[in-house]
């Protein structure tokens, strides 16, 4: 699967192959949910990764054309590296980026494209993930589990933030 580059040189979303759509609601304002995805201090606290994984390395330049590189360590101690390029950053509405797992030899695997859309829904935020470019249904389904677990982790982080803001005397963990 390949993605085409637009006039800016950024990759355009791949449009063939299995696609993934996930919609989740978070009990937090849209601006805060967007910040949780883009602010390094928030990212460090909730570790944008599935439950049980630890983020050991993050390099991220969140701007169109900016690159990121992340290492997630599994509960078994196996490091999983991924990288990508931000293709669109529209605070607090949309974040798009390429997403590529690195093979054990460090070479890039299949490049997919992720778009996160943040929408106000009363006092909540609707977060929609759309990922394209998978080479197999199994890969798409594996990502479904990973993203869903990551969203669970984000929901817990946002609930903890809300509890602390409701009780400012509570200490931060």
Image (cartoon, rainbow, N blue to C red):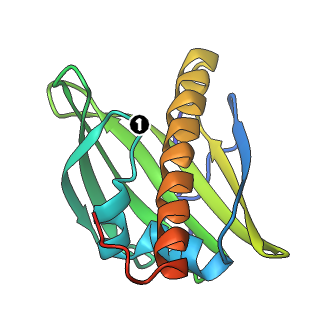
Q: Is residue 137 above or below residue 143?
A: above
Q: Let me know if residue 3 appears in the view.
A: no
Image point 53% across, 23% down: which residue? Answer: 142
Image point 60% across, 82% down: which residue? Answer: 31
Q: Nearer the viewer, residue 62 or 161?
A: 161
Per the image, the residue denoted by label 1 is 51
Q: Residue furthest top?
A: 138
Q: Is residue 120 above or below residue 12?
A: below
Q: Let me know if residue 169 appears in the view.
A: yes
Q: Nearer the viewer, residue 113 or 23?
A: 23
Image point 71% across, 43% down: which residue? Answer: 22
- Residue 141 sits in which quadrant? top right
Image point 34% across, 36% down: which residue? Answer: 101
Provide residue 26's location: percent of width, then percent of height. 68, 60
Q: Nearer the viewer, residue 97 or 120?
A: 120
Provide residue 32's location: percent of width, then percent of height. 56, 78
Q: Secondary structure at mark 1?
A: loop
Decide: few, some or many residues near mark 1? Use Cα within 10 Å; few <14, some 14-19, many ≥20.
some
Provide residue 154's location: percent of width, then percent of height. 51, 54
Using residue 15 as the reference point, say whether residue 141 is left or right of it: left
Using residue 47 as the reference point, say whether residue 12 is left or right of it: right
Using residue 137 as the reference point, say whether residue 158 is left or right of it: left
Using residue 159 as the reference point, say whether residue 78 is left or right of it: left
Q: Where the C terminus falls, by quadrant?
A: bottom left
Q: Is residue 88 above or below residue 90?
A: above
- Residue 168 sits in which quadrant? bottom left
Q: Residue furthest right?
A: 122
Provide residue 1's location: percent of width, then percent of height. 53, 33
């Amino acid at each position: 699967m390949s993605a085409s580059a637009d006039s800016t040189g950024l990759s355009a979303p791949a449009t063939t192959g299995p696609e993934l759509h996930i919609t989740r609601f978070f009990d937090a304002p849209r601006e805060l949910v967007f910040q949780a995805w883009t602010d390094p201090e928030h990212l460090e606290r909730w570790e944008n990764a599935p439950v049980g994984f630890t983020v050991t390395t993050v390099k991220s330049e969140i701007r169109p054309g900016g690159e990121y590189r992340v290492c997630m360590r599994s509960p078994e101690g196996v490091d999983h590296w991924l990288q990508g390029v931000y293709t669109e950053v529209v605070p607090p509405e949309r974040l798009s980026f390429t997403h590529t797992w690195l093979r054990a030899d460090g070479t890039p695997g299949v490049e997919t494209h992720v778009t996160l859309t943040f929408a106000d829904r009363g006092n909540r935020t609707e977060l929609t993930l759309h990922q394209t470019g998978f080479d197999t249904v199994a890969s798409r389904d594996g990502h479904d589990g990973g993203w869903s677990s990551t969203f669970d982790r984000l929901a817990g982080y946002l609930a903890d933030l809300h509890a602390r803001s409701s009780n400012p005397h509570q200490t931060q963990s």
